[in-house]
Image: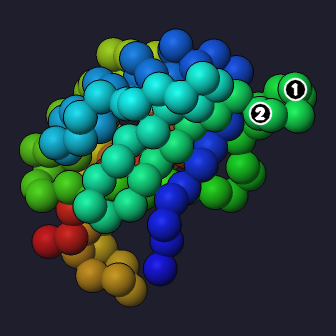
Amino acid sequence: MFSHIMIGTNDLARAKTFYDALLGTIGVGPAVADGHRIFYMTPGGILAITQPIDGKPATAANGGTIGFACTSGEQCDAWHAAGVANGGTTCEDPPGVREGGMGKMYLAYLRDPDGNKLCALHRM
């Protein structure tokens, strides 16, 4: 359904450091840079991070979340730890198992250095 997701940043170098570490925990290689943007290319789609082309500050979506698929709870924990170690901040409940209408899942939530809400998810 999706070809790519693009989010904004106010500091491309900081975003690259953060996302290289974060996505490395789930097997995604370092970003490819293209001037004012960086790209994480995977068979499942592309995550792009850009400085806004209109010159205005990047802002985070209120109510938006970008979810990353993980293969285990341990991988979710490594993802979360890498994010916090590289400028992210934890949000929501601590990483762990949650049960609801979508079944049993292991979830970990972060905000990136620009405030975008991210989730690592392992369906159990």
Query: For this view, does 6 lie left or right of residue 124?
Result: right
x then y, percent, for residue 32 = 40, 30
| Closer to us: 61 or 9 | 9
Query: For this view, does 40 lie left or right of residue 79?
Result: right
At x 38%, y 41%, the residue is 40
x then y, percent, for residue 71 = 12, 58
Q: Secondary structure at mark 1?
A: loop
Vertical order, 84 against 58 (above or below)? above
In space, the residues marked 2 and 1 are separated at their CA atoms by: 6 Å
Q: Secondary structure at mark 2?
A: loop
User: As drawn, which residue projects farthest toward the front?
Assistant: 34
Per the rendering, the mark at residue 102 is: none
Vertical order, 87 against 96 (above or below)? above
At x 47%, y 26%, the residue is 33
Q: Are marks 2 and 1 in contact (CB under 8 Å)?
A: yes
Per the rendering, the mark at residue 55 is: 1
On the image, which quarter does residue 49 sit in? top right
Q: Quadrant of the C terminus?
A: bottom left
Instruction: Return the residue at label 2.
Output: 52
Q: Amino acid at mark 2?
A: Pro
Query: For this view, does 83 lie left or right of residue 66?
Result: left
On the image, which quarter does residue 50 sit in? top right
At x 60%, y 23%, the residue is 35
